[in-house]
Image: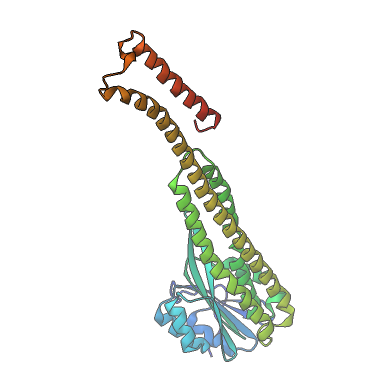
Amino acid sequence: MNAITPPSAPPASNPPMVVNCIAYRKDGSRIGDVTIDAISDVLAEPDTFVWVGLYEPDEPLLEKIQDEFGLHDLAIEDAHAAHQRTKLETYGDSLFLVVQTAQLIGGELAFGETHIFFGPRYLVTVRHGASQSYAPARRTCEHAPELLANGPSYGLYGVLDFIVDNLLPIVRDFREEVQQLEHDIFGETYKSSTVRRLYDMQRDLMTLRLAVAPLQDIINQLIRLHPNLIPEVLHAYFRDVYDHAFRVNEAIGAMREMLTAAINVNLSLVSLRQNEVMKKLAGWAAMLAAPTLLTSWYGMNFAHMPELAQPWAYPGIIVVVGAVVGGIYLGLKRAKWL
């Protein structure tokens, strides 16, 4: 039997798609980095488990992982194809989880997913798309060896908690952006870019909610249906992840309502401004219609128009037109049409 790779030896034979491959003892202490080929040797030792982190692995690497841990064909197929819904599948004494992830990249929300293979002596995470490395979650778990002594289940908690906690800043950033967009909504000028951004945020939050909502059910299943894999001592920690997921889901729901209200208010303000413009145009049209009506009489070639022979006729009609237009202007001004 080959010896386990000591901590000081770098896993040089691991492909670049392997982010981490670390072995642990039953007491939660770290044995060290190991190569993919040495996983079976580690598991042959009693009271050990392995935590592997992969990023967008190719098919040969997944097949190697399958051979080392004895993973189910359907789970490997899903992990390779990606683009799966959030779910929890049971294969014998092991679980396969798909969790959606999200990350703000350049101000835009990008989505990814993580596939998790979880068994009594192993935890394998396979990341696709936009997601942060789980190295911080691993370090946090290693700082609590008394809890890591519960095996890969505590590592699973650390990964799920890390995923959910990374969603809260996204919702917080969205809330701050909506507050900034409110200035544009109530501004004097209409900006189509404001409505477009509100719609994009509404779409992103819908996708985010579809990722978070099923996660609550998955955590409940982990606590209630898998006591052989999730010890009772860790139930409180998984309930804490559930509580965080619930808070994120509620925050997303509130944000969606805010965005819907903002879009409706923006459309209402646009309609109101258009009505104001139409009222002003109608008022000026009414003032122009009065002199047009009066002066059009003198283009009808009537023979008997006695005022035409009077020297005051021209200035008189000007005064009459001015009085009529002035009266209309004052009436519209009082009605706040102008």
Along the viewing direction, whichever of 121 and 303 lies nearer the viewer: 303
Residue at figure coordinates x 57%, y 54% from the top left: 261
Residue 105 showing in the rendered view: no
The percent position of residue 30, horizontal first and vertical second, equals 63, 76
Along the viewing direction, whichever of 245 and 198 lies nearer the viewer: 198
Residue 199 showing in the rendered view: yes
Residue at figure coordinates x 48%, y 76% from the top left: 84
Height in image: 183 above or below 20?
A: above
* Extreme residue toward the top, this view: 311
Height in image: 122 above or below 337?
A: below
Residue at figure coordinates x 59%, y 53% from the top left: 175
| Display colour scheme | rainbow
Q: Is residue 80 left or right of residue 26?
A: left
Height in image: 299 above or below 172?
A: above
Q: In this view, does 198 lie to the left or right of 163?
A: left
Quarter location, residue 158: bottom right
The percent position of residue 200, horizontal first and vertical second, equals 47, 57
Height in image: 338 above or below 307?
A: below
The percent position of residue 101, horizontal first and vertical second, equals 53, 68
Residue at figure coordinates x 27%, y 25% from the top left: 300
Along the viewing direction, whichever of 213 and 152 lies nearer the viewer: 213
What quarter of the picture does the N terminus occupy?
bottom right
The percent position of residue 114, horizontal first and vertical second, equals 52, 73
